[in-house]
Image (tube, rainbow, N blue to C red):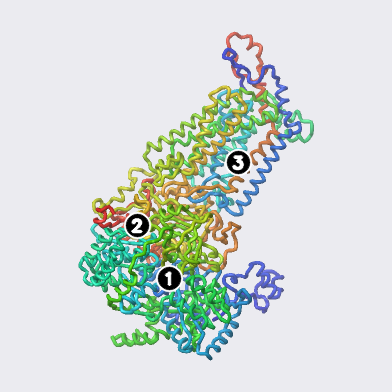
Amino acid sequence: MSYDAPIKELGETYLLPEGTTAHQVTETIARVTENKAPRGWWLLFLMSLTGLGAMGGALTYLFVQGVGVWGNNAPVYWAWDITNFVWWIGIGHAGTLISAILFLFRQKWRTSINRFAEAMTVFAVLCAALFPAIHTGRPWFDYYLFPLPNQMDMWPNFKSPLMWDVFAVNTYLLISVIFWYMGLIPDFATLRDRSKSLFRKRAYGFFALGWRGAHRHWQHYERAYLILAGISTPLVLSVHSVVSFDFATSVVPGWHTTIFPPYFVAGAVFSGFALVTTLMLICRSVFKMQNVVTVKHLDLMNKFMLGTALLVGYAYAMELFIAWYSSNPYEQWVFLHNRLGWGILDSDGNWGPLWWAYYTMVFCNVVVPQIFWFKRARTSVPIMFIASILINIGMWFERFVIIVTSTYQDFLPSAWGMFHPTLIDILTYLGTFGLFFTLFLLFVRWLPMIAIAEVKGTLQGAHPDLHAVEALDEPGAATAPVPAE
Amino acid sequence: MTRRKQYELNQGKGPSMWRSLEDKNTDPESLKKLAEEEQPGGFVRDLVAPASLVTRRSLLKGSSIAALAAGLQGCLRRPEDIIYPYSKSPENLIPGIANHFATVTARGRDALGVVVTSHNGRPTKVEGNTLSRASLGATDVRAQAYVWDLYDPDRSKSPARRQGNALADATEEEFGSFLQELLKTHGADKGAGLRILAPISNSPSFRAMRAKVLTKFPKARFHTYSAVNDDNAREGARIALDGAATVPIYDHFKSAVTLSLGSDFLGNEQGAVAAARRFAATRALSSPDAPVNRLYVAESNFTVTGSMADHRMRSSQTDIEWYARMLVIALAARGLDDLKPIAAALVKNKDEGAAAAGLDTKWLEAVATDLANHRGQSIVLAGAAQPPRVHALVNAINAALGNFGRTTSFGPDTDRDDPASAKSIADLAKDAEKVSSLIIIGGNPVYDAPADVKFADLLARDGLTSVHLSTHRNETTELCAWHAPLAHELEAWGDQVALDGAVSIQQPLIAPLYGGRSEIEFLAALAGEETTRGHEIVREAHGARIQKDTKALLGMGLSTKELNGDALWRRGLHTGILFTPQAGKPSVVTDAVINALLKNKVREEPRAGTVEVSFEPDPALWDGQHANNLWALELPRPMTKLVWDNAAIMSPATRDAFGLKNGQMVRLSKGDARIEVPVWPIPGHADNCITLTLGWGRTAAGRYGNGKGFDVNPLRMLDGMDFTGDVKLEPLTETYKLVQTQTHDRMEGRPIAIDATLDEYKKEPDFASYRSVDPVSTPPLWKQQDYSDGYKWGMTIDLASCTGCNACVVACQAENTIPVVGKIEVERGREMHWLRIDRYFVGEDEGDPQVAVQPVTCQQCEEAPCENVCPVNATVHSPEGLNDMSYNRCVGTRYCANNCPYKVRRFNYLDYHGHLDDKFAWYGDFPESRKLQFNPNVTVRMRGVMEKCTYCVQRIQEVKIVANREDRKVRDGEIKTACQQACPSAAITFGDLNDPNSRVAKLSGIDRQYKLLAEIGTRPRTTYLARIRNPNPELRKKGS
């Protein structure tokens, strides 16, 4: 952990209020796992369990009957299933970005949210991974997708982007879990040491892997963390790029677009930050952590969202431009008729029936974030809460628009169709929220939801030469990295 | 007939083989029970009803000598005649190798020769018979679908008798003794009060038996009723041709100009299969200089014939007659002397003035000029719905144009004394008082008789003994006192004569599944004949002629060695043609035609607020006889693309005039008769006219057909069996969900189904490849596969020939065991047809568009987009360039289907081979009998698996194996895909593209070829040949 003192001349302040002690941090965070759960937690947990139960029911029905219980059809062979997959996996990206890339860029403000975001990543990737697994016609043969040597001499097709997906998602899940767990080790030790019951002691002790806080531990830990951050960093870019290849390498107009990889990554980070904000705001108020996750953190996150929203907006505009510029009638139809809705293209003057999905997407993803140009909006909890939810809705619609409005009217008008979701579609989607929040609530209840050790590293008192630094005339003279504890 | 007993385990002799001590020491009864538990329903019992099975032994034992001689080996369920034990296994019976038998299926008074494929005794697939002039090797939709009817799980399985308000199963013996009783009664009164009602039959044996019954019961009467018939044409011929009840047979191949006056001669009319082949032959141009015919159509509904027209005139059914009358005047003015007396009479009647209102005379003048310029090479046809006088007039026109003997010929004059169906059933109703016993053989008059006959009331009369023989217990059966099952055409011996007089033998391919008897067998029993076996009756009916012919041939010097007694009969069975056609040579009586025409003096203007309603048979359900046939129910109707329902078809303008929405219910009423149907618009339909299709809305069709669609028969009355004016239309508030397989009707300017006029073609012969961009400039991503070695399978589809009749769609379904999914699933867009026919409306005028049809199936792309994206290698390329599906590997990610630009892949979203339930309940319970139809060479796909057209890879393999064994290459034309085989217009060609002399290689190189969506770089193996229209330059000049 490095230490950067705020540059006072620039108006920088400490992330946490001055005078916050390491004990206060430990106390604030660890007591959540030790005290009784607040009523709000129980309420949310019951709701989540209900959602999870609904998903169980929906999946049982799905497995017994077949994928036909969803609204997927011909020509819309993928619909909510893959929309949800891409959406969830996109959400995960914020976690990796915060924990790995921001780590490498020495963004100290990440410390208050990274644990949280990493947990979100893991759970979101789990939710995402569920969809490719259950959306197949014969899920009991899903193992055919893995290169397992078998007596049938079958081998997967490495030309298929779906195959790349399998690797990308699995790698991502694995690295995310390891990275997350790595960061948890010192905090597990803290919890272990604070434990009053034998069971807690044993349980946390098991996961703490014998951490004693020795210098050698810290040295290995920091090195490993850095390496994992290095491994994770390309994943932020690669996973969603690979996911976008599912579409970009196909021939379907509206999918077959070279802009997809960066566009998807930007969208992923965008939606991930939005969900982190949403969840953060809830937890912050439920567990009273306004002092650890400050408005300053939120402000920075909102700036991030604004930036990615501009990237995404650029991609939207560029797609339309290319559709027009290419003179490709199929692509023009998809973008101008199916998405923008232009009825003049249709010989009967009918508007593309899903135009509203496109405009919902543009409104939520491009128009709404513009409010973050204003500092008042960036620092207002209600505004950012609503905005973050709208952005999440918008990002879901982005995937829906890409998947459904491209396929429902593609090359041959004779094969055109329409998509209508079924109850099972809705239940499955809501069910993943059940799964996500169940896991998430268990996480905030039993694990330190904020990286205790890392937050302490940003405290004013964390610097060993604190007084010397304050005495120095030239600012930044003592910014060399020093161990946090 | 040998009956199959339950599968017997050890027969009480003590087990000779056992699996456990418990097994060994149990008594046979409990063993049987054990087996039942292990395999509910027994091992084979569920295949068919338990009472009518052949034992496994008898199936190996039994064989018929006649069948052997004719190559009829291989029936698992053998016809009952002359069964001898095998002393050794019959030749050609190789398990796994299909046998093919020639037989025939009835089309009213016509007959369609077919060849039926039989797998180990199960008929599974119907194909055309190249030797039959009605088939020319192709079939129609109904021929493809009728094998399904054989295995219909809702067929009647036993006789039944009325008990209270319901039918209760009865035994054969009970029915037999009832029949004896009935015969005894009528034996005494010589048949007074005995009436027999049967549909139109084309069977000489039927006629012979009918005569015998009448000899035995002189006072009995026969009545004939078929809801769909050719009575108008026969009556017309009676008028024009001096009483000869003979229907003209047209040779479209010889025609340069054809005018159809409401005749759907490529679709629903008699002889459509042969007509399509001959017509298409003049359209499938190999170069711009090849001769091409021109088709004018005046019609009310938009039919497949109308879609092939170069000039189509929308006209009400009523006005078609006036077009015909004006045509006569116009033709007479162009020097057709024979028509002058008729024209003079019509002019005197002021036809011109009456007709001028609203009729397009310019169009007609152009047609008349064209016809007059092509004397002897033209055809004028009248639709089956047109009144007899129009048919009479058309006969006169064809005679005057010199078409008789050239493009128009006549078969023998049969059933000369048979009255028209409507008259016959009206007569029966008239003297209902005198009827004490009514025997109905087949048909379903309670459902389809004219509404004002009130047939149901007739059956309900006290003191009437009614008997209904039918394959299903239908609406009529439910009201009869007795019922016995009737054998399916594939189960019974019979004979049929085609319109041209060719006689074919109807061979059974399987013993009656449920012990049914045929019509002729029943009549023989009624007549008290010595033998009531179909086989002998049929042989006897033709015995004399066979003997005569044999003698004549012997006289010509053939040796007795070649011509022993059975030779002609056997040849007849083998080829499917027993006797060749005979031609009739009628001549026209002009006065009679004039008299008939003058009976209808004034053209009646339609009254405001009313519509003209015409009835036509459904292309698949026909008059309702196939109403439980799943293939027929889910077949997209050629123009509307509706499935699972019928509707009131009208023009968009009429719909708007009445302020209706698509699918809105309307009440159509005339007098007391009324029906309620939903509305469906079709551009190009005549305004103020409604077309209703028969055959729907059955209440006792079976589990699949009950309650599907709307019964329009209550509006069909004796004075308007074909069409009727002055029908009141009242909009109702509710709407009904109608489901189409294709919802977008326009090509949106894309080069998909490409067509051009003849002039454009001449100017630019390779216009098609211009319009669709060939991506020569798109280099492939990886090294190209070299296909120059071995076979390189390819297909061409000629859009100039294709009429969009759908025969290929059902053929594909039958061959490849493609499931039917039900209305709800079709609504979701999940129909499974591997081959679909796209129908696009072309042209600016939305009220009167042209139509382009295009069969689309897997294009077998060399650079298949589906293959790259499959993560599990379930769809891969064969060395011969086929895009193969490996069902076992497929996990069902559906990525391939997303990436297929043609959207020809089909996904089993649910267990479609399970029980079909409209309410989307759990799938399960698939009727065992239907499994007998499955093609054993094709995998039955489970849910969650992707499937698609394979170019009938099983057929390719079958032929390749034979060729390999004979150490030769596959010959061109040796492999025929199912769609190609069925196609009446021979639009589909399949073969080896590596063989420069193969038909497919030649066709795929002609100038109007193009590849669909080639610009994507898929390199399809299927080549389309663009359609050429041949409009009359004169009409175009005038902007018509």
Mark 3 to mark 2 CA distance (whole Å): 49 Å
Is there one chain holding both mark 1 and mark 3?
A: no
In the rendered structure, the answer to whether residue A454 lies left or right of residue B781 reads right
Residue B588 at least partly seen: no
The residue tagged 1 is B719
Q: Chain of mark 2?
A: B
Quadrant, the C terminus of chain B: bottom left
Tell which tag, 1 or 3, sits nearer the viewer. 1
Quadrant for residue B952, please give it: bottom left
The percent coordinates of residue B198 (x first, y second) are 47, 78
The disc labelled 2 sits on which kind of residue? Leu
Q: What residue did someone put label 3 on?
A: A127
Residue at figure coordinates x 35%, y 66% from the top left:
B263
Residue B193 visible from this viewpoint = yes
Q: What crowding class fits label 2: few (fewer than 14 Cα within 10 Å), some (14-19), or many (20 or more)?
A: many
x and y percentages locating residue B499 in the rendered image: 36, 75
Residue B25 position by quadrant: bottom right
For label 3, the crowd category at 10 Å Cα-Cα, with few meaning under 14, some 14 to 19 and many 20 or more, is: many
Q: Is residue B801 above or below residue B146?
A: above
Q: Amino acid at mark 1?
A: Asp
Marks 3/2 same chain: no
Q: CA distance from mark 1 to mark 2?
A: 41 Å
Q: Looking at the rendering, in which quadrant would you find the N terminus of chain B?
A: bottom right
Residue under circle 2?
A: B799
Q: Amino acid at mark 3?
A: Cys
Q: Chain of mark 3?
A: A
Q: Residue furthest right?
A: A197
- Is disc 1 placed on a helix, strand or loop? helix
Q: Nearer the viewer, residue A422 or B436?
A: B436
* x and y percentages locating residue B627 in the rendered image: 50, 66
